[in-house]
Image (tube, rainbow, N blue to C red):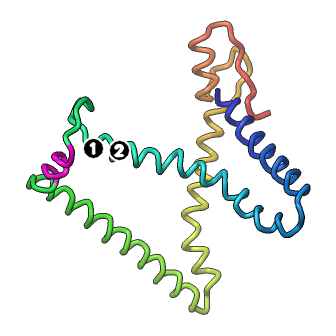
Amino acid sequence: MGLLVAVGVPAIQIGYVILVERLLSLLPARTQRTLRPGLWLAPALAFLAAFLIYPAGYTVYLSVLDARSAAFVGVRNYVFAFTNREMLIALRNNLLWLVCFTGLTVGAGLLLAVLTDRVRYEAAAKSIIFLPMAISFVAASVIWKFVYEFRPAGAPQIGLLNAALTALLPGVRPVAWLV
């Protein structure tokens, strides 16, 4: 299934681009300029509708039904949610987290960016800021290397994938995944 998605999705995208460009090439230049932006936006809007708008609408639909989604109860669920003390406290706490955390994070990042941009040793300061991110990528790559580590058959397998493969399926030879 993963291979199907990994190959199928890009193939569909490339096919869409080729098809759209071929169809547009049959039209006059002025019509092409008018239609091209909409045709390039169409896949993104389709994904937005499928994965954001439809679920949001379905959630609103479910919110006006009872707990078993069997009977229509109207706004009774909303009345309960906005008159229940515990629910109001939870809503307030969520809004505080949303506003304060987002605001402080964006504000601190913006302040750090402006201050870093104005110092004499700008390159060194930016290196210090971005170094932890680079180190985490290095650490992640080392961890993944250990997952795919290969030892010849008969030797103890230290790679997680080969160790699991040879332990769960006796007689199966280890695979050199990274070669």
Label 2 packing within 10 angstroms: few (<14), some (14-19), many (20+):
few
Circles 2 and 1: CB atoms closer than 8 Å: yes
Q: Identify which residue, 128 or 11, lies in the foreground.
A: 11
Which residue is identified by label 2?
Answer: 59
- Quadrant that contains the C terminus: top right
* Picture layout, residue 106 above or below residue 91: below
Q: Identify which residue, 132 or 97, lies in the foreground.
A: 97
Q: Residue at x 43, y 74 (%)?
A: 106
Q: Position of residue 127 (x, y in %)?
A: 61, 74
Q: Position of residue 154 (x, y in %)?
A: 69, 14
Distance Cα–Cα, label 2 vs label 1: 6 Å
Which residue is identified by label 1?
Answer: 63
Per the image, label 1 sits on a secondary structure element best described as helix
Residue lying furthest top: 171
Residue bounds of the magenta highlight:
74-81
Q: Identify which residue, 94 or 61, lies in the foreground.
A: 61
